[in-house]
């Protein structure tokens, strides 16, 4: 389906007053003249007048000019200017070590203008400091309003976003800046440990939120968006993040327009791409090649999977590589099987029925969620913790994975049921709106995967994922082998599996790590019991666990790629699953023909 006007999305900065990020560094050549610095001062002076700030004397500038002109390119000079307003200092400009005549200077503090709660782009002055602009395309969709904007707000009030940040929403809806602020303000909440400043932080965040109406199939509105961003960014360095929560049929048209009209010209540009990443190997490859052809390199593309941002998934590598008690056991020698469980006790989310009916549970949950988690779990130790080193090891696991066949799979579909309190009826999958009559799309899958390498040869990786199940549970269960020649085997009877140690990483709900061990029951007799050593996060650690979108968006800003799918990883996941998907589709067609 082409990306048309009617497609529905799936999903002050300013000149002074912001602490300059460590990346806020600019270079002066040794030959920078007094007249150039004089012009810079006049620019500052004009902007102060526009913002209604008190204009300071030019005497401090004279000291700066004198210090700068006396710098000979071999030693270290220091230039200090005076205040530029009641709370502003363009100061402590430190001239650091020279390398072949280059001087690096960085301003440590720049004063902040007061912004009206109803500020818009026309009220703001271009910034001369490095700037960050985050644009959410598909801004009025459920994903944006329920997850992305709240995550950005959480990053802002916890100090992980710079003050010189602007956040744009882009969609087809006829909204104003104020309309978008009102829309998302209902979803913004502060965690308990930030409650004191919540009101002030909310106001400050909303001042930095703007809206641009536009469609996805032409570039005209992208050019308008670029112009509005440039008004905020000014002539200084500016970085841009584009979160693409757009219909899949619009993705490549949007990226082509962004590349042509809205890339940063003075900093980096990064794309966050939401699922689906294609429907099979061919369509996924087409998307990947389309992103490259649009002018985006692999290090600019962040294919996001929210499960990988969960605290326990992030803790996988820490648990294994920083604990001697676990790392030697992480192989076929000691591990009998590993279970990856993703169980949802609700059906398809409202508004997503048509999407899910086209995708099915294997594409929706297994292709990215489950396979990426398995790759993180099973990879060899990386050379470093750098993103590329970790992704290199993950892709090796995926390339070693045996493709399952239909004989290895159990498929199912949830039926109508009664709620837990017995007071209401829960519709079955075929009763959901926008689901095709007599649809054979599976909502549950159970399968076994094998990794054919020396570490994991013969170990079954059991995958169970589905919607509309009895309980909500996301966990990894690692079952170890029995103790050889167990002296207490007679105490366990015939079920020796009951004596097996088990490590459980519970991702949701209530993050926890449980280790099942065998223990003697206190008393005069010899009775054994299986007990759990339990690390429950909510009891051990103060504060709330950050949402996965917070972690992943911050990783994008920081350039950390290890939790995002690289192009070759993505291709490897589809190589594993495409033969199975084709086999299932062929069987559907045969059944439809009967």
Image: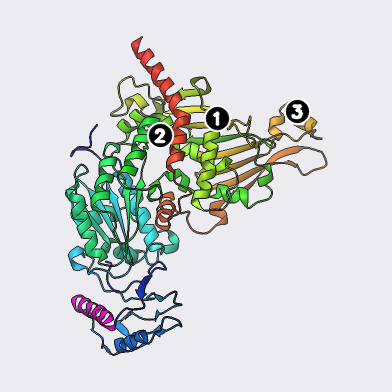
Residue with the mark numbered 3: 493
Q: CA distance from mark 2 to mark 3?
A: 42 Å
Q: Nearer the viewer, residue 336 or 503?
A: 336
Is residue 130 placed above or below 501 in the rendered structure? below
Q: Quadrant of residue 565?
A: top left
Residue most toward the front?
Answer: 100
Q: Magenta segment, which residues?
A: 34-51
Residue 364: which disc?
2
Q: Nearer the viewer, mark 1 or mark 3?
A: 1
Q: State yes or no: residue 49 in magenta.
A: yes
Report whether 241 appears left or right of 583: left
Q: CA distance from mark 1 to mark 3?
A: 31 Å
Report whether 529 appears left or right of 357: right
Q: Nearer the viewer, residue 271 or 311?
A: 271
Pick whichever of labels 2 and 3 is earlier in the sequence. 2
Q: Position of residue 345 (x, y in %)?
A: 44, 35
Q: Is residue 248 visible?
A: yes
Q: State yes or no: residue 391 in magenta.
A: no
């Amino acid at each position: 389906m082409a990306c048309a006007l009617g497609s529905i999305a799936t999903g002050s900065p300013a000149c002074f007053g912001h602490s300059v990020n460590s990346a806020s560094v600019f270079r002066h050549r040794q030959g920078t003249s007094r007249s150039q610095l004089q012009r810079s001062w006049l620019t500052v002076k004009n902007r102060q007048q526009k913002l209604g700030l008190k204009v300071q004397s030019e005497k401090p500038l004279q000291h700066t000019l004198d210090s700068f002109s006396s710098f000979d390119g071999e030693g270290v000079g220091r230039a200090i200017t005076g205040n530029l307003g009641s709370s502003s200092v363009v100061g402590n400009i430190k001239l650091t070590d020279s390398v072949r005549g280059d001087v690096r200077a960085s301003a440590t503090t720049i004063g902040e203008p007061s912004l009206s709660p109803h500020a818009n782009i026309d009220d703001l002055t271009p910034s001369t400091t490095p700037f960050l602009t985050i644009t959410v395309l598909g801004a009025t969709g459920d994903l944006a309003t329920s997850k992305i904007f709240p995550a950005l707000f959480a990053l802002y009030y916890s100090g992980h976003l710079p003050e010189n940040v602007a956040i744009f929403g882009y969609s087809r809806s006829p909204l104003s800046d104020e309309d978008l602020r009102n829309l998302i303000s209902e979803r913004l909440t502060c965690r308990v440990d930030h409650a004191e400043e919540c009101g002030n932080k909310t106001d400050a965040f909303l001042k930095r939120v703007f809206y641009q109406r536009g469609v996805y199939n032409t570039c005209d509105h992208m050019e308008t968006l670029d112009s509005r961003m440039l008004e905020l960014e000014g002539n200084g360095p500016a970085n841009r993040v584009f979160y693409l929560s757009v219909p899949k049929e619009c993705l490549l048209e949007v990226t082509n327009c962004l590349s042509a009209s809205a890339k940063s010209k003075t900093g980096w540009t990064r794309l966050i791409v939401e699922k689906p990443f294609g429907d099979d190997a061919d369509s996924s490859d087409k998307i990947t090649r389309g992103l490259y052809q649009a002018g985006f390199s692999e290090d600019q593309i962040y294919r996001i999977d929210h499960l990988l941002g969960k605290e326990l998934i992030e803790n996988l590598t820490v648990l294994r590589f920083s604990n001697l008690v676990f790392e030697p056991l992480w192989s076929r020698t000691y591990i009998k099987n590993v279970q990856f469980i993703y169980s949802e006790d609700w059906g398809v989310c409202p508004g997503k029925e048509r999407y899910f009916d086209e995708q099915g549970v294997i594409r929706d949950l297994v292709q990215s969620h489950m396979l990426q988690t398995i790759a993180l779990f099973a990879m060899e130790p990386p050379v470093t913790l750098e993103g590329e080193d970790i992704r290199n090891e993950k892709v090796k696991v995926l390339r070693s994975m045996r493709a399952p066949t239909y004989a290895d799979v159990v498929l199912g579909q949830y039926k109508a049921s009664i709620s837990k309190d017995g007071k209401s009826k829960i519709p079955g999958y075929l009763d959901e709106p926008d689901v095709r009559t007599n649809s054979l799309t599976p909502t549950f899958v159970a399968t076994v995967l094998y990794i054919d390498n020396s570490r994991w040869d013969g170990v079954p990786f059991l995958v169970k994922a589905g919607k509309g199940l009895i309980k909500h549970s996301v966990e990894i269960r690692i079952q170890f082998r029995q103790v050889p020649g167990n002296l207490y085997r007679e105490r366990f009877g015939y079920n020796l599996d009951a004596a097996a140690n088990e490590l459980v990483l519970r991702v949701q709900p209530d993050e926890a790590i449980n280790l099942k061990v065998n223990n003697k029951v206190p008393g005069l007799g010899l009775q054994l019991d299986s007990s759990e050593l339990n690390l429950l996060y909510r009891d051990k650690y103060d504060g709330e666990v950050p949402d996965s979108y917070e972690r992943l968006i911050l990783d994008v800003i920081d350039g950390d790629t290890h939790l995002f799918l690289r192009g070759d990883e993505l291709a490897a996941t589809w190589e594993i699953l495409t033969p199975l998907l084709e086999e299932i589709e062929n069987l559907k067609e045969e059944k439809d023909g009967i």
